[in-house]
Amino acid sequence: MSTPTTSPSSTRPDSEAVSSSAAIARGALPRWAPWATLAAGMLVAGLLSSITGFAVVLFAIETVLFYTIAIYAWSRLVEGARKAADRRFTAIVASAFLLALMPLISVLITVVSKGLERFDLQFFTYSMRGVVGAGGGAYHALMGTLIVCGLAALMSVPIGLLTAIYLVEYGRGKLARAITFVVDVMTGIPSIVAGLFAYALFGLLFGPGTITGFAGAVALSVLMTPVVVRSSEEAIKLVPSDLREAAYALGTPKYRVILRIVLPTAVAGISTGVTLAVARVIGETAPLLIATGTTASTNLNPFEGQMATLSVFAYYEYATPGVPPDPYLDRAWAAALTLMVIVMLLNLVARLISLFFAPKSR
């Protein structure tokens, strides 16, 4: 006697129908709910701004407040207290992140929009020698920035990297703790103190009033070195101990392990740290005002005479404009945009170094 058979499709309900029924049973907001709530919040904030007057910060705060309250209330009615609390916390964290980005976006838009007025070929090929009013450029300041920061990196990177290697691979006892303490203290040194230190040092060595590009490089190296030490130390600590132990098991000397295993493995983090250190000091103004000074002519010798840099050039163009002030302000914004472009290129170089020189996993 045969028993009736049923197909699997007739006994199993459709999975999509099951998930839909479960979603309805437990109460879930549709996927478009956050976006719809955000759009409604922007609409309400826009209506309030039309009454009180539009302000970007006030508009953003009103949108965030309405979105947080609305999404929490909606979720509380449909999904329950636990899911509503989760959505509220997510809204607060995302809103804080977006509000923190607003100053950065504002600075970026302002610098780009105003800096493009003089971001031309003349700006990068002419100095300010003999120029009063419109015209001229920042060639002398650009070359001074590259020379001073290059010398600072040339001094800071070897010292910082070797210090980091010592602290991670060799440092034990009181000396290592003392070096760590000094590095921590140097990290918080105000930039003006570094400029005064370089000015006083060169005044003692070469006579009072000695102001050169190399003095500015020494001041910047004081600020760069602790950043290089800290970033390189963390990058070297991330190298797995198994790699070191495997090399030691083969009888490899320690210095060879560092040169062939540790440093190539940590090159991505080290390059990023060096880039951050250069970006940290390339826009410094106070130490260069004291130690390097400024000039309207092109000076490519860092060991003799004052040398212009982009940060100091932008400061003087903006702080002491002539009549009419527009050409001076345009040059100041163009110098600020140039600094931003240089920092962006440095970050790109660091990414390329990480891409091409970091060890590949197979």
Image (spheres, rainbow, N blue to C red):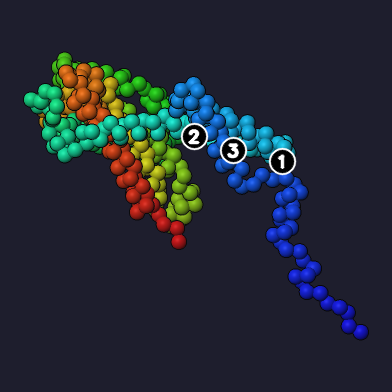
In the rendered view, would you say 172 is above or below 325?
A: below
Where is the N terminus found, in terms of image quarters?
A: bottom right
Task: Give the label on residue 78, or none.
Answer: 1
Which residue carries the number 2 mark?
Answer: 98
Secondary structure under tag 3 reads helix
Q: Which residue is pictured at 37% across the width and 42% down the height?
A: 272
Name the amino acid type tagged 1: Val
- Residue at mark 1 to residue at mark 2: CA–CA distance: 27 Å
Q: Which residue is pictured at 56% across the width and 33% down the height?
A: 41
Secondary structure under tag 1 reads helix
* Pointer 1 or 2: first along the chain: 1
Q: Nearer the viewer, residue 76 or 275?
A: 76
Packing grade of label 2 (10 A; few <14, some 14-19, many >=20) is few
Tell me where residue 278 appears, x and y as whole percent. 31, 35
Which residue is outermost to the right? 1
Nearest to the eye among marks 2 and 3: give it. Answer: 3
